[in-house]
Structures are given as structure tokens and as C-alpha cells.
Amino acid sequence: MTATTSATASGTRVYRLGEFHRFDSAGAHFLYLVPAGAIFAVDDAAGKLIDCLAAGELPHARLIDDLAARGLTIGDAEELVAEMYHANVIVADDSTPEQPQDLPDVFPIQTLVMNLTNQCNLSCQYCYEFGADKVATPEGKPKFMDLETARTSVDFLLAQSGDRRSIHITFFGGETLMNFPLLKEVVAYANERVGEQGRHVDFSLTTNGTLLTPEIVEYLSENRIGVTVSMDGPKEMHDHLRVFANGRGSYDIIEPKVRALIQNHRTRPITARVTLTSGVSDVIRIFRHLKQDLGFHEVGFAPVTTSPNQLYAIGQKGMDGVLEQFHELAGEYLEYALRGEAHGFSNVSDTLAELCQGVNKSHPCGAGLGLLGVGPSGDIAPCHRFVDSDVHAMGHISTGIDRAKQADFLRRGHIDSKYDCHTCWARPLCAGGCHHEAYVRYGDTGHPNLHYCDWIRDWTNTCLEIYGAIAARNPGFLQQFAERKAE
Amino acid sequence: MRHMRPLNKKAVRIDAYVASRTDDVVGLQDAAKQQRPHVPMGCSIMFTPGWEVDAAGGTAGLCQPVERDIYDCFVSCYWPAQVPDHLNNSPDWTAKCASATKDWRNLDLVFP
């Protein structure tokens, strides 16, 4: 009886193509279903159906006839249409896209980024905390976080993390290690508190590497603290903008320290985080140096966040060059993956992890949602990039989150508010891009980052092709990404 | 699905959804598994090898005649179900059926 009803319903449908991105890889055909974030391998028959509807909508009977003319039996054609219709690859007037769910009233926090200090011993010109485009207003605020604020922050995280079994604390700055004594206090205190509750906490930090000592490295290794080093490549590139206040480059200071870090920190992978600027965009050379010469486990790249008129901003031409080199490294990544080996280009692995989950984001990242930043003064910010900014403060660690400000931030940043994104197939992963970048570029955290749309689509497509090729030829490799997401 | 193979977690969920909308409803289906017609292996209350159909879906290979199954409900099962009960209301229901394979047609409906 069910079959009869649905046959009647399907008979009157008029179909058109749904929202998907079609791509080929390793000689096979794939679809990326946009509203869902789902990836499917499809056969030739599915391709024929899409071709049939490419010119416009067709009623059910016509579609079946067209498919029959392309060599399918009537039974096969009916089955194919039903499959594709229920999966929303093709849609009809009776297709009702599910409305995005409202955010829950209380969203548990998983990660707290603690800016232990807003002071830094370097004067990198592009720094978003001190450079020309800074949003921070640190005047009159403490320069170093004190123990009480730090402990209150840990208590705050524990209280706000709901029933999450595992929580995360990231130490940030300024230069994080300028407040290393406090870092140790926080680790000890947080471990003690989660121990009482039978939960788990893990730690990571970002540093410029200048203050690393053998004792610090040993401590970081013993306490399983993940380390990301901000480093821009070989000496001449790194020293281009990553300089001390007197203009001297920092490469010679950090190079031996980083080598010692990678050699002696054995409990967590060590990551390099590269900021690409107009003078530093030789991606392949930077990657080779950081991965092969220095031995970082993973290397990730991001173009500098800046207003477009800064000299170090990467122009369109520079970005095209970057993308070209990203493609080359991505190709290399695929070769490694097919052999089951880790390559270390984290821009690919991070995207593959999201593709594997099939994320479909309401917001570009967890800022203000599952992640918050806290500054030395105890002010809460959506993330570390907004710390110490009066405009973006979202309450104080002692009084809790300012729910009205949080709601405003999240409403602006929601994909529903970004009309430019509604026709883009890459929105499940991008969701309009970094809130902070948007604020620096457009003066509104909720503005989509339209200056890199083409770039994001190209890169997402590249990663989809890699995903498809791995799924076809070495699917076991993807298992690591299925398990990677924290609960 | 025959034409689309799911490759990520979200696709697996869509796959299950589509299956629920396109597959036939079958007897004794198990919602947790892919729903396909399958051989019922005995009734849920007692284990009787050879219940209804053999492993190939027919009755030729049963270890006892298919018609014999009726007695598992009528006599040996405590649960008054598909057949009249022999304890109170229909003690003589099988009186005209000495050999199930030959006389099963004599087992008639009971009209209370």
C-alpha cells in the first residue's frame, strides 16, 4: 500500500536539480550534497539523470522516458529517480528543506583559550594584536594574567562545559612563555580539578619559540602539552616580518630551540603555523624547510589577516601563486595518503577531517559557541583574536558570559544572515569565514569574507578530489579522520 | 542505494534515510539492519527447527513436514495464539487429522 501511495505521488512530481557540487577524481564520479555536507560516489546512471535535468525541470514521466532513451530499463529508471529524490540530489515542489535548528539555549564550552599575557618580545609587523589592524584596546588593563584570574577561568570552563567528558585549554599570548610560571600553575590546578570530577583536560600552546629552554621543553613533554610554533619558513622569509623591537630577525634565536623542541618533546605532534604575506609566499620552500629540515610533524598555512591596503597584504596575484603551490603540495599529500603515510600538510588533513564528518556549519568556527577566549584582565572574548577588545568583550570570567552580546555575535555570524553565501556550494565548510578577518576587512564580524570566495571554493574542490581519490583507492586512510573529532 | 555509495558520515545517514523511504516493508524486518526479505527461523517463543520454510525459502528441505508445525502451536506451546487451544475450548480440533501431512485439510476454522 505504501508503494501505491508513493507511486501516485511520484507520478505527479516535477523534478529539478538539487544543490550539489559534482566532481571527478581517480576516474570516478562524486557528488558533494551541499545542504547536508554528504559525499557520495555515483555511477554512470546517476550522471545520466543529472544530465537529463541539466537543461531544466522535467515531469516524472518525461524523466523516466529520457532515462529509458539513455539505455536504462523502466524499473531501473524508477529506482534511480526514487533514490536521487529521497537523497535530495533532485528535488520537486514537495521537497521541503529542513530548517536549520535553533541553537540550544545553553551551549557547553569545550575549549578555553587563555591569553596568559598580552606582552610579546617580538614585534611582528603583521600581528593582529599589535599591528596596524589590531582590535585590542589593552590600555589600562593588566599585562599579565594573575593566578586568581587563571583559577577562576579554569573553574568557569569546568562549570560551563556541561557534561563534556573532555575539555581543552589553549595557552596563548602575547608570547605565551613570557608567563610560563602561571602556565604551570594552571596545568596543576586544572589537572587537580578535573581529577576530582573524573573528567579529562588536555592542553596546548602557541609560542614564537624564542623563550623555549630545555627545562620548558621537558615540562611540556611530560605534561603532554601540544605545541604550535609560529614560524614563517627559512631565515630570509622568517626574518622578513618576525622581528624583535630593534628590527633584528628572530630566526637565529629560535632555530636551535625549535630543533631541540622537536627532538625532545615526544608526547604530542609539534606543529608549525605559517603566516603568508606578500614577501613570504613561497609555500613549497617554506614547507620543505619546516617539514624536512626542521622536522615539524605538521605544517599549516594561513594568509595574513589584514585590511587590503597594508604593504604585507597578499594581493590577488599572490593568492593565485599560493593556491598553485597548495595544489602541488596537495598532490603530494595524496601520493602519501595512497601509500598510507602521513605527509604533514595540515591544510589538507584539517579539511579532510571536516569532510569525513560531513560538517555543515551554522558558524565558521567555534568562537563564542564551544570556544571562548579570556584575556589577562579576565574579560571574555569570542576567541583569542578578540581578546582585550572592549568592543567585542562578552562578559567577565567572574560574572559569566554576557548572553546578550553572545547572542548578537552568534546571530551576526550565523550562515542564515550571510546572504552572499546562500548560493555557494562551499558554505558547509566555510560558513563565511573567520569572524575576526571579517571585522578587520569589513568592520562587521558577521560579514562574509568575500575577498577569498574563489580561493575557498577552489581549495574545497581540491580537498574533495583528494577525499574521493583516497576513498576509492585507500579508504582505510580515512579512518583516522572518522575518529579524530573529539566527543 | 544502488547508484550512490556513501563516503562520509553524513552520507551514511542519508543512505539509511533513503533506504527507509524506498525499501519494501517485509515480514519480521529488523529496523537496525538493512531491511531485506529473510527466512524466519522459528517462532519467537520456542525453538523449532524447520519452522515454515527451509534455508532456501521453500518447504522441501524441512526436517519434518511443514504441516506438522501446526502441532507446535496447538499442543506443545503454552501461548494461545494462531490456533484454537486444546485445553479448554477445542480439545478435539485435530480429531480428524491423524497424519498432518495427509489430513491437514480437515483442520478447520473454529467459530466460537
Image: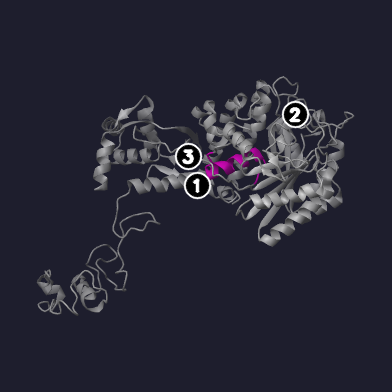
Q: Are marks 3 and 1 on the same chain?
A: no
Q: Which residue is denoted by mark 3 in the rendering?
A: A36
Q: Which residue is denoted by mark 2 in the rendering?
A: A134
Q: Is residue A481 visible?
A: yes
CA distance for labels 1 and 2: 39 Å
Q: Earlier in the sequence, mark 2 or mark 3?
A: 3
Q: Are marks 1 and 2 on the same chain?
A: no
Three-letter amino acid code of the residue under disc 3: Ala
Taken as a whole, is the magenta stretch helix, strand or loop? helix
Q: Which residue is denoted by mark 1 in the rendering?
A: B9
Q: Where residue B72 sits: x, y (%)?
A: 24, 75
Q: Which residues are magenta?
A: A342-360
Residue at image position (36%, 58%) is B30
Query: Which residue lies most toward the top here?
Result: A309
Q: Is residue A72 magenta?
A: no
- Label 1: how many residues lie within 10 Å, few (<14), some (14-19) or many (20+)? some
Determine whether, in the image, residue A471 is placed left or right of residue A43. Answer: right
- Kind of element beneath mark 3: loop
* Relative vertical location of residue A310 with respect to residue A8 in this rendering, above or below: above
| Front position in the image: A130 or A70 | A130
| Front position in the image: A226 or A401 | A401
Q: Is residue A426 visible?
A: no
**The residue marked by circle 2 belongs to what chain?**
A
CA distance for labels 3 and 1: 10 Å
- Kind of element beneath mark 2: loop
Marks 3,1: beta carbons within 8 A: no
Residue at image position (21%, 75%) is B74
